[in-house]
């Protein structure tokens, strides 16, 4: 048995070792305090340029940048071993967390500033910024749900009622498609139905930004497809309508022999076998200045030259053919190993070599041999093998399936190349003008630099609409390189938020890097107290097919760490909103941001009740 003097010596030795360990930890914490203060001094001009209400956030962002420049993993483990904060949840109040740690370890010699940017104040700032951007908090949860609007024809009162009842808080209108008239119809339907439900749901307009789209200039014979109008259950709710004309101008118009059009009468039939080999009959319903309005109870596929038969009262009046329809860009089909050309003209000297035109030819000057070309949001990935006067010679590395179809207008990206694009085009200006008149904010796509932010902020300030929201979509490699500057520039506007646009970000960075980057963007959003939207393919299978996958349910549970989750459109979107709202409500009882929170667990209670019923002692946890 050890003597009392030996026990005393051991206790003194242990106490001395613990004191030394504590002093070493305190020294490292004080070094971190100096590092974050040094970073704040370096970023002093950026902090002072922020709006007064965002200045504390800009200062904390500088502190967070200073913290994350250091590798503190071993320090974190040592702090956790002592039961202290490991700084893993300090994003919103970095300096206060360091000061508190220094105090617990024996004092820092510095009094905390007043008013303190502690956890409570950081959370209050984040919540205030979130409400300023998105409106009043949802009644049964903290996380907002945003839904992407469908095409205007599908944005009916029934659709709006369904998604609002399911829990939609915000509507997103994507202005990369349709016209201002269509956007206005969609916004009007949503607002009016929300008002009837006593809701003040806000509308955000997605400004397309400088996304590059592949242009296929080679043409092929056009096919005019007119689908049946169906309800959400797939039932036909209205006949297919078409305008019979002498010459096709646009849209749902069928060109007939010119001499037929002025002689048509209501009740006449135009019979044909459509491009798919299916017999169809068009019934003339009314005469209009442009020609005649006809209907069919089936879907229609028309091609130039199809034989027509004009009937009246069961008798054939005349026979003819469908007139010229506009040609369309041809589709390309690619498999791994296939080759294609990218250049300004979309032409190739080799007829067998497919050519794709890039709408911004100057971009191609920044591409180097060995760099990737990504098409259609990652469905096709190619490598630049050679560059000559004709353009970029590319070889397909990966395809979603063999073969994968590429249509004109699909996205083209150069994730390995450092390119710069103009920010606001004509389509962007049209979208911004519409949003300022009919919406509550805009989401700006492809923000790459702080200059991009400054340009859009200048545009919004000129419009003089206080409280108009701005969301910056983070979706490019260049944005990740310039993230601190983008965030400091964002803090010069209010209200403002961030979107993690995971689709394009995955194309730019790879799917492997996306998993890491989406976490880092959540942390940076919290560091500058700005709300974050988690976007792209959330419950996408459920929205489109009515059945979710296991993986996307887990993804939806992860999404609630953001302030808002965005869903895309789909025939089952209301079901997706309901499931997402339910998942968020349940997860909010267990998780807040990165912090696990412990409510009583029925599973644990059941274990204890089972042991008690069996007359056994309550099991004890294993010793650590």
Image: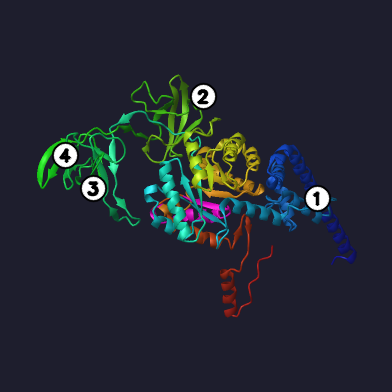
Sequence-wise, the earlier of marks 4 and 3 is 4
Label 4 residue SS: helix
Quadrant the N terminus occupies: bottom right
Q: Position of residue 469 (x, y in %)?
A: 57, 46
How far separated are the C-alphas under marks 1 and 3? 81 Å
Q: Position of residue 138 (x, y in %)?
A: 55, 59
How far separated are the C-alphas under marks 2 and 1? 53 Å
How far separated are the C-alphas under marks 4 and 3? 18 Å
Residue picked out by circle 2: 365
Mark 3 vs mark 2, foreground winner is 3
Residue picked out by circle 3: 295
Q: Residue at x 75, y 57 (%)?
A: 82
Residue picked out by circle 1: 26
Checking the image for residue 263, the label placed there is: 4
Q: Per the image, is 545 magenta? A: yes
Q: Residues within 10 Å of mark 1 (few under 14, many from 20)?
A: many
Q: Per the image, is 125 magenta? A: no
Callout 3 touching callout 2 (CB < 8 Å): no
Span colored in magenta: 544-567
Q: Residues within 10 Å of mark 3 (few under 14, many from 20)?
A: some
Question: Residue furthest toward the top?
Answer: 389
Label 3 residue SS: strand
Sequence-wise, the earlier of marks 2 and 1 is 1
Quadrant the C terminus occupies: bottom right
Sequence-wise, the earlier of marks 1 and 4 is 1
How far separated are the C-alphas under marks 3 and 2? 52 Å
Sequence-wise, the earlier of marks 3 and 2 is 3
């Amino acid at each position: 048995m050890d003597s009392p003097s030996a026990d005393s010596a051991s206790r003194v030795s242990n106490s001395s070792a613990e004191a030394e360990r504590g002093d070493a930890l305190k020294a490292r914490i004080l070094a971190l305090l100096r590092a974050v203060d040094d970073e704040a001094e370096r970023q002093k001009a950026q902090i002072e340029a922020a709006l007064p209400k965002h200045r504390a956030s800009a200062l904390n962002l500088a502190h967070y940048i200073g913290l994350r420049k250091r590798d503190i993993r071993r320090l974190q483990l040592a702090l956790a071993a002592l039961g202290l904060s490991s700084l893993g949840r300090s994003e919103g109040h970095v300096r206060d967390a360091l000061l508190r740690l220094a105090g617990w370890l024996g004092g820092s010699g510095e009094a905390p500033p007043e008013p303190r940017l502690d956890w409570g104040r950081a959370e209050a700032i984040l919540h205030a910024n979130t409400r300023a951007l998105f409106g009043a908090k949802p009644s049964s949860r903290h996380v907002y749900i945003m839904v992407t609007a469908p095409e205007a024809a599908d944005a009916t009162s029934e659709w709006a009622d369904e998604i609002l009842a399911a829990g939609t808080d915000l509507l997103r209108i994507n202005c990369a498609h349709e016209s201002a008239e269509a956007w206005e119809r969609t916004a009007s339907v949503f607002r009016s139905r929300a008002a009837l439900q006593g809701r003040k749901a806000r509308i955000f307009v997605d400004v397309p930004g400088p996304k590059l789209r592949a242009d296929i200039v080679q043409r092929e014979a056009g096919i005019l497809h007119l689908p049946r109008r169906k309800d959400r259950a797939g039932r036909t709710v209205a006949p297919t309508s078409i305008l019979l004309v002498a010459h096709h101008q646009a849209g749902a118009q069928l060109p007939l022999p010119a001499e037929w059009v002025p002689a048509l009468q209501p009740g006449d039939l135009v019979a044909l076998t459509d491009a798919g080999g299916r017999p169809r009959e068009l019934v003339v319903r009314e005469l209009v200045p442009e020609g005649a309005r006809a209907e069919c109870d089936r879907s229609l596929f028309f091609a130039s030259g199809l034989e027509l038969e004009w009937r009246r009262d069961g008798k054939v009046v005349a026979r003819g053919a469908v007139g010229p329809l506009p040609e369309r860009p041809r589709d390309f089909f690619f498999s791994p190993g296939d080759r294609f050309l990218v250049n300004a003209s979309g032409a190739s000297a080799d007829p067998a070599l497919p050519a794709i035109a890039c709408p911004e030819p100057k971009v191609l000057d920044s591409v180097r041999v060995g760099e990737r070309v990504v098409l259609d949001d990652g469905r096709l990935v190619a490598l630049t093998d050679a560059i000559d006067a004709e353009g970029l010679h590319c070889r397909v590395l990966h395809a979603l399936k063999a073969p994968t179809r590429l249509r004109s207008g699909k996205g083209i990206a150069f994730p390995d190349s450092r390119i710069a694009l103009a920010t606001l085009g004509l389509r962007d200006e049209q979208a911004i003008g519409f949003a300022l008149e009919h919406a509550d904010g805009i989401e700006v796509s492809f923000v790459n630099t702080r200059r991009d932010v400054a340009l859009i902020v200048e545009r919004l300030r000129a419009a003089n609409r206080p409280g108009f929201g701005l969301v910056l979509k983070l979706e490019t490699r260049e944005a990740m390189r310039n993230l601190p500057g983008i965030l400091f520039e964002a803090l010069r506007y209010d209200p403002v938020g961030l979107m993690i646009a995971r689709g394009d970000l995955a194309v730019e960075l790879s799917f492997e890097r996306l998993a890491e980057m989406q976490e880092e963007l959540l942390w940076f959003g919290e560091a500058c107290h700005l709300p974050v939207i988690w976007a792209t393919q959330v419950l996408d299978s459920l929205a489109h097919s009515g059945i979710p996958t296991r993986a996307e349910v887990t993804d939806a549970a992860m999404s609630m760490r953001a302030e808002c989750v965005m869903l895309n459109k789909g025939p089952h979107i209301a079901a997706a909103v309901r499931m997402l709202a339910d998942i968020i409500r349940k997860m909010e009882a267990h998780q807040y941001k990165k912090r696990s929170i412990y409510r009583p667990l029925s599973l644990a209670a059941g274990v204890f009740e089972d042991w008690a019923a069996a007359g056994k002692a309550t099991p004890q946890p294993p010793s650590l």
